């Protein structure tokens, strides 16, 4: 069962329940998912990292900067971790360990 089929199933739908336009969209999505390569993912992640970096560098308003800064940094960290997982298991383990170093245990737990 592919991802699209799983989503339909979770929504209580079947392919036969879709109208013509929905079926065309569904078929296109299934086709797109099957053709994604690791290289495509790496390129997309790199593009997204660059986009976040540009947004971080463009922040000028102090109030805007505080709110968006945290969000953008979290996105950037996620892209870096994902890229590390795709690039090599060793890099992934190091990135995950580095990320977990910053998490402080809560008192009482």
Image (cartoon, rainbow, N blue to C red):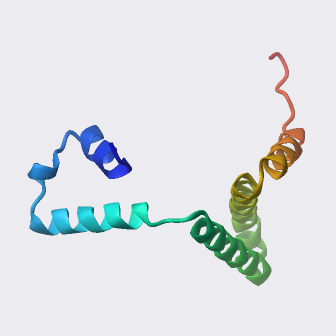
The percent position of residue 65, horizontal first and vertical second, equals 75, 71
Position of 94 with respect to 51 (left or right) is right
Instruction: Please tell me whether residue 94 is drawn above or below residue 23 in the rendered image.
Output: above
User: Which quadrant is the N terminus positioned in?
Assistant: top left
The percent position of residue 87, horizontal first and vertical second, equals 75, 58
Quadrant of the rendered image containing residue 93: top right
Residue at position x 35%, y 48% in the image: 2
Instruction: Please tell me whether residue 44 is drawn above or below residue 15 in the rendered image.
Output: below
Position of 13 with respect to 4 (left or right) is left
- Most extreme residue toward the top is 108
Residue at position x 67%, y 77% in the image: 51
Quadrant of the rendered image containing residue 73: bottom right
User: Which quadrant is the C terminus positioned in?
Assistant: top right
Quadrant of the rendered image containing residue 86: bottom right
The percent position of residue 83, horizontal first and vertical second, equals 72, 60
Q: Nearer the viewer, residue 35 or 22?
A: 35
Residue at position x 82%, y 26% in the image: 106
Residue at position x 69%, y 73% in the image: 46
């Amino acid at each position: 069962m592919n991802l699209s089929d799983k989503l339909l199933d979770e929504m209580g739908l079947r392919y036969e329940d879709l109208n013509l336009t929905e079926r065309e969209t569904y078929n296109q999505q299934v086709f797109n998912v099957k053709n994604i390569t690791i290289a495509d993912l790496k390129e997309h992640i790199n593009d997204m990292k660059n986009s976040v970096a540009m947004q971080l560098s463009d922040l000028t308003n102090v109030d805007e900067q505080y709110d968006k800064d945290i969000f953008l940094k979290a996105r950037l960290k996620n892209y870096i971790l994902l890229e590390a997982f795709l690039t090599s298991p060793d890099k992934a383990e190091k990135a995950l360990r580095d990320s977990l170093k910053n998490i402080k245990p809560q008192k009482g737990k």
